[in-house]
Amino acid sequence: MGPRAVRCRRNNSPKGKAVGAGVVINEFMEKNTAPSVPYVYLRSDGTVINDEPVKVVSSCRLDIYMFPFDTQNCTFSFNSYKLQTTDMEINTFWGNNLDRLQISKDVMTTMGEWELVGLNVKRFEFPSGIGNGFYQELRFYVAVRRSPTMYVVNLLLPSCFLIAVDLFSFLLPPQSVDRSLFKMTLILGYTMFLLIMNNLLPVTGNTIPLMNVFLSMCLVLMVGSLLETIIITNLLCGLAKNSPVPWILRVIILKFLGPLVLLPPKRKEKTDTVIENPAAQETIRCCTSEQDSGGSSGFGKKLHLIRQQVEQQRSSSEVSEEWFQMGYITDRVVFVTYIIFITVSFITIVAMWAKSA
């Protein structure tokens, strides 16, 4: 804190004695290291003006929930630890609050992170505890606003870009291993980014900053999309070769969710000309009758085996096609949900930051 000037007026006492009244700042945390000025201004009306500079290292309760779009309010209390109101009156020689704010902005120097946005002064009187006396206290209410440019450029924009890349990775084929490898690489890169930029986040305060919630949400979304890719890949490459689709999943996913995401179930078409051909059916019946009459049974057995194999392949193909279609529908549903969740979350967080700015 730069030099502060207070004007102390002592009544019924020799001029100059008010300097020893001991005006202190209650928020002092360390010893004053400013150079001592052994001069005071004495006026004929008993007013004593002490322009001694004070370097204040004080405590301030921080509310960092809206970091980096936060505004902090700090208080500096000036009072005498020795004299009451009847002996000393503390005043400022500045004008109104707007004048004080403008003067403070002109003389204030910062590292560029904070901007002074408010400065109000109020005077209070409290019982001194000695008789019926009172003592005065002068309070400066200082409001400073953080400059968010560095945090937006170094934290928010890279996180938004990586989330956008993770979102567009849904356009990769879900059955391909490259999609899961791409997402794992993206998560690894984002984790390293958070570790490198961790020193930019605040470490003090009673609440978790909204920025931390935003960064954690981005990481959770990336991990969730990777888990979804693993499940879909297993669904397309593993379960498609095993049991048929349960009827409950067929109703929920194929019949209900499919049309919602513009992937309706495909109609089954009869394309097997080997089984449905009447000539083939007649040949099988003739060969079967020849087998019963002791004819060439080998040819009939081969036709039966061919028919069984074709039916098995067709059934297996239908099951695989249903599993593949379920995988694509599930992937599309997760993709749409991912977009909706990101949109709502980002709009909510940005609205909260904009309201506090």
Image (cartoon, rainbow, N blue to C red):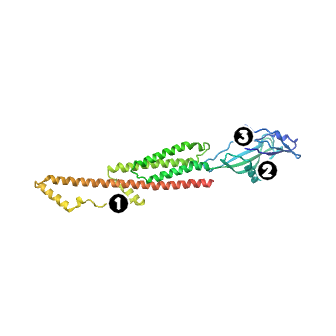
Reading the image, the residue beneath label 1 is 266
Neighbor class of circle 2 (other Cα within 10 Å; few <14, some 14-19, many 20+) is few
Instruction: Note whether 281 is above or below 240 in the view shown.
Output: below
Please state which amino acid type lies under the numbered disc 1. Answer: Lys
Q: Is residue 68 visible?
A: no
Q: Position of residue 23 (x, y in %)?
A: 78, 41
Q: Is residue 220 visible?
A: yes
Neighbor class of circle 3 (other Cα within 10 Å; few <14, some 14-19, many 20+) is some
**Of 39 and 25, which appears nearest the observer?**
39
Q: Secondary structure at mark 3?
A: loop
Reading the image, the residue beneath label 2 is 94
Name the residue: 42% across, 55% down: 332
Disc 3 and disc 2 in contact, CB within 8 angstroms = no
Q: Position of residue 337 (x, y in %)?
A: 47, 55
How far apart are the two marked residues, 3 and 2, measured between alpha carbons? 23 Å
Q: Secondary structure at mark 2?
A: loop
Q: Secondary structure at mark 1?
A: loop
| Image quarter in which the N terminus is found | top right
Residue furthest out toward the bottom? 278
User: How many numbered badges does the structure rendering display?
Assistant: 3
Residue 138 is left or right of residue 257, and the answer is right
Residue 271 is left or right of residue 132, and the answer is left
Please state which amino acid type lies under the numbered disc 3. Answer: Phe
Q: Position of residue 300 (x, y in %)?
A: 16, 54
Please state which amino acid type lies under the numbered disc 2. Answer: Trp
Disc 3 and disc 1 in contact, CB within 8 angstroms = no
Q: Quadrant of residue 54?
A: top right
**Earlier-in-chain disc, 3 versus 1:** 3
**Earlier-in-chain disc, 3 versus 2:** 3
Of the two numbered discs 3 and 1 in the rendering, the one whose residue sits closer to the viewer: 1
Reading the image, the residue beneath label 3 is 28
